[in-house]
Image (cartoon, helix red, strand yellow):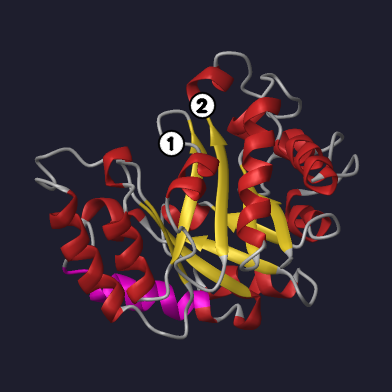
Amino acid sequence: MFPVHIGTCGWSYKEWVGPFYPKGTAAGDFLSSYAEHFTVVEVDSTFYRSPSTKMVQGWRDRTPAGFGFSLKVPQSITHENVLLDCRAEVEAFVAAARLLGDKLLCCLLQFGYFNRSAFPDRDAFLERLDAFLAAWPRDVPVAVEIRNKGWISEPFADCLRRHRTAWALADQDWMPSPLGTVKKLDTVTGPFGYVRLLGDRAAVEKQTKLFDHIVVDRSAQMQADAEAIRLLSGRVPVVVFVNNHFAGYAPASIRELQAMLAGL
């Protein structure tokens, strides 16, 4: 089996001080404290704006050798321009991401749901994605997550495979489960597997705004996710990221997932 590395979606949660970070931990020390527990993290803040040189260098310098970052590609590229006429934005983002050196795991293109006014069908989207991935720099690993469940298909997998791009499988309330997709299609499209446990944001936020404890039992879903991860790791290394919105408190969800994986 290939290795599985698990981390959270972000680390800047003040409510984790006490339950996860030692009491009294300053915000500037969150990342270094986080890296004592997990070896990977997905950075959500880069979705809102491309990070500065100083910011990326800080991430790099506050984490140990062997630590890895997945950076979400800015929404200006994925949501506003939707992959068109954004060469300058891509170049600026990639230049910043490269400052991580060997700590850069990949960059994640997370798309929203597209209605017919954006793309008439899946093939129109794939045509644009294919051209974008063809121009993406070969030295920067990339993963893609889509949120149109009808587009989960062999043509989508083939597009990713042509460019050695990882398929980011999300456990999300309205999408097919990662396990169902792994069993139906060949989802190994790049050099690593990528799984995101996102859950149902609205359901969790109805119960809490402080993400410091589990509020929704996702054990059944997680067991299926663990099986999907196990199947993927039989073929490639896998990175897994757990969001607070999956069950209420990502570090506890990770401990539960790790126990399930150990039992498979």
Q: Residue at x 62, y 41 (%)?
A: 225
Crowding at mark 2 (Cα within 10 Å: few <14, some 14-19, many 20+): some
Crowding at mark 1 (Cα within 10 Å: few <14, some 14-19, many 20+): some
Q: Residue at x 42, y 75 (%)?
A: 164
Q: Which amino acid does label 2 sit on?
A: Asp
What is the C-alpha distance between the residues marked 2 and 1? 13 Å
Residue 89 counted in the magenta span? yes
The residue where tag 2 is placed is 200
| Numbered circles on residues, count | 2
Mark 2 in CB contact with mark 1 (< 8 angstroms): no
The extreme front residue here reads: 184
Left or right side of 62 for 173: left
Which sits in the foreground, 142 or 55?
A: 142
Left or right side of 260 for 155: left
Left or right side of 139 for 194: right
Where residue 113 appears, x then y in whole percent? 28, 40
As displayed, is residue 264 above or below residue 60?
A: above
As displayed, is residue 21 above or below residue 245?
A: below
Split into 4 quadrants, where in the image is the N terminus? Answer: bottom right
Question: Where does the magenta region start and end?
Answer: 85-97
Where residue 183 appears, x then y in whole percent? 50, 47
The residue where tag 1 is placed is 176
Q: What residue type is labelled 1?
A: Pro
SS for dot 1 = loop
The extreme top residue here reads: 207
The rendered magenta stretch, by its main secondary structure, is classed as helix
